[in-house]
Amino acid sequence: MKVFAGNSNRHLADAICSYLNVPVGKASVRRFADQEIFVEIQENVRGEDIFVIQSTSFPTNDHLMELLIMTDAFRRASARRITAVLPYFGYARQDRKAGPRTPISAKLVANLITEAGANRVMTLDLHADQIQGFFDIPTDNLYAVPILARDVKENYELENVMVVSPDVGGVVRARSLAKRLGCQLAIVDKRRERAGESEVMNVIGDVTGKDCLLIDDIVDSGGTLCNAAEALLKNGATSVTAYITHGVLSGGAVTRISSSKLKELVITDSIQPTTAVQSAHNIRVISTANLLGEAINRTAMESSVSSLFD
């Protein structure tokens, strides 16, 4: 087994390799003057089980191209098996035709990764579980819920906690966390008028006197979370904390979160935190390195990955 990394999240790759007690593979991923990407694998990989760690986060297209070119390089270097490890799978929100004459980009990206030569894909908290079916190769969709649940237990008195889904579409994810914690579940009914904007309409469930935990897979602009926090506090919640797997946090999201009524935003390191994220007073990052490392180890040893979540 050899583990390599692109440029998207070197801190996470280093942490995963530390867990596995293996060095990060030697590879050069650089750019020519015109920003064309060039990859050179600097050690022998013939017959090896290769894992390439690369989140397709901002700049999404650059990091996706790095992954594709690295995969092609390993295939041409006669690697035995190539597993693309994507802690964050970009384009996952484009998983269906949302309107006439629009693409299903998640399927296109799945095809690109497969055609580049990947034999297997490993990812974390896909925006929609059915995206696994977009790949024609084995795909492991890991879940961050056990990590989030552990953090909640370390920081909250569970008898006063209520798990909240920020919209109707996230109820399954929220219910999974609520079941692990033995807590009640509430839902924020949200109506989105246009992309990037949201309006909270109603809170389903009694949140009076509760420490509310908003659970979702992606936080991008932060508007949904901030609106949901205000609605919950108006309905009597004591505090509102958000637990989100992927901290995309584009544009002015960090400023919006910092000035909001959220007690805290907890995200994972599936996307490498920016300097602004690290310096924000109410944003905290927890690690997925052990989860991903153990999944990589079990894949290499041909043992069960799903038993990680039993």
Image: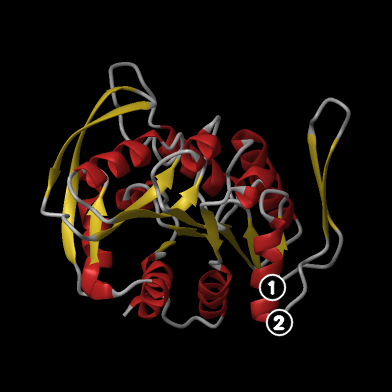
Left or right position of 67 against 102:
right
Q: Residue 87: in sight, yes or no?
A: no
**What is the residue that sits farthest to the top in this orientation?**
101
- Disc 2 element: loop
Separation of residues labelled 2 and 1 (CA atoms): 6 Å
Where residue 110 is drawn, which disc sits there?
none
The percent position of residue 198, horizontal first and vertical second, equals: 30, 29
What amino acid is found at the position of numbered circle 1 in the picture? Answer: Cys
Q: Is 281 drawn above or below residue 96 in the view shown?
A: below
Q: Which quadrant is home to the N terminus? A: bottom right
Q: Residue at x 74, y 51 (%)?
A: 73
Circles 2 and 1: CB atoms closer than 8 Å: yes
User: Mark 1, residues whose alpha carbon is within 10 Å: few (<14), some, or many (≥20)?
Assistant: many
The percent position of residue 244, horizontal first and vertical second, equals: 41, 53
Residue 289 picture quarter: bottom right
What amino acid is found at the position of numbered circle 2 in the picture? Answer: Asn
Q: Residue at x 38, y 51 (%)?
A: 217
Q: Is 40 drawn above or below residue 293 in the view shown?
A: above
The residue tagged 1 is: 17
The residue tagged 2 is: 21
